[in-house]
Image: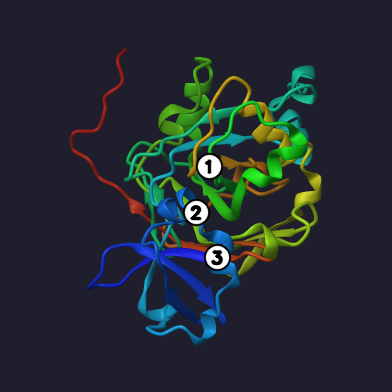
Amino acid sequence: MKLVTFKTPNTQPRLGAWINRDTIVPLEPASMLECFAQNRIADISRSHLPSAKDQIPVTDVQLLAPFPQPASLRDFGVFKTHMDAAARITGKEISPEWFKLPNYYRGSTSPASIAGHEAVVTWPNYTEKLDFELEWGVYIGKVGKNIAIADAADYIAGYTIYNDISARDIQFRHMTLALGPAKGKDFDNSNIMGPCLVTPDDIGNPYNLRMIARVNGEVWADGNTSDMYYTFEEMISFVSQSETLYPGDFLGSGTVGKGCGWELDRWIQPGDVIELEVENIGILRNRIGEPEVNPAAWKEKV
């Protein structure tokens, strides 16, 4: 089942099912969070949605991120090919610790930072090197703590595509301070998710899915989820040690090999259209906006 959060010009955001490629069926409860909290996903999957009333053409709705405000956002880095490229570019070997335990940072979950399908990507006033990242991720569907790897799949409510927009020049400066990417990733519309959430029963084998990035119709990246060194089940178990996970928490995979401009030394420009595709989920499409102009921009101390 493909579930979405959508709105029309005359409605508030609400939950829907995306059927027959071109139709949205409004559902109850009205929000994705309520659906998870009430454990309603199985009921929805068993219903006869094609015969439901009040169907809406997908062309008439705005698709928001499946969770317009995730409870939390943790972005990992689990693709070995991407790590190999980072080592080659930076001249620094992969830390031995990377092979022992998964690593992540916490991203912003402010309403302004989360965006969905067809949203215009913010170009911050402080960067000259904006980048996309071809990722995907899972939403947690129920409360859990100290989850065993063998049980972790039961906590996955669904999968979605994730475009982790990054201001590379400021990101790498921040990371020399050892506290994370900061304004390299925290700005409006920087965490793009969608176009839908696909429930586990419809994803197939999650560790053999093709991932493609296109810029203005040209393929820039073509990878596969089979390159993940850690599974989502392992990530869930790791994060849940002595820490409670809640419905709506999001775990990102990190970038697939060659899935960003930094790896390729190719840089997106204002007006470019980015399409990220993950097999069995769909295509997440966004246009890059013009650089923002801010007379009150931060002036660096000297």
Any mark on residue 43, and which?
A: 3
Residue at 61% in and 28% down:
240
Residue in front for this viewpoint, 40 or 261:
40
Nearer to us of marks 3 and 1 is 3
Residue under the image location 45 percent in, 33 percent down: 184
In the picture provided, is 144 more to the left or to the right than 4? right
Could you tell me residue 92's position as x and y percent? 73, 21
Label 1 belongs to which residue? 250
| Sequence-first disc among 1 and 2 | 2
Q: Is residue 27 above or below residue 100?
A: below
Q: Could you classify mark 3 by the number of other residues whose Cα lies within 10 Å: few (under 14), some (14-19), or many (20 or more)?
A: few
Residue 222, quarter of picture: bottom right
* Cα–Cα gap, marks 1 and 2: 10 Å
Q: Report if residue 42 is visible in the image.
A: yes
Around disc 2, counting alpha carbons within 10 Å, would you say few (fewer than 14), some (14 to 19), or many (20 or more)?
many
* Dot placed on the residue nearer the N-terminal end, 3 or 1: 3
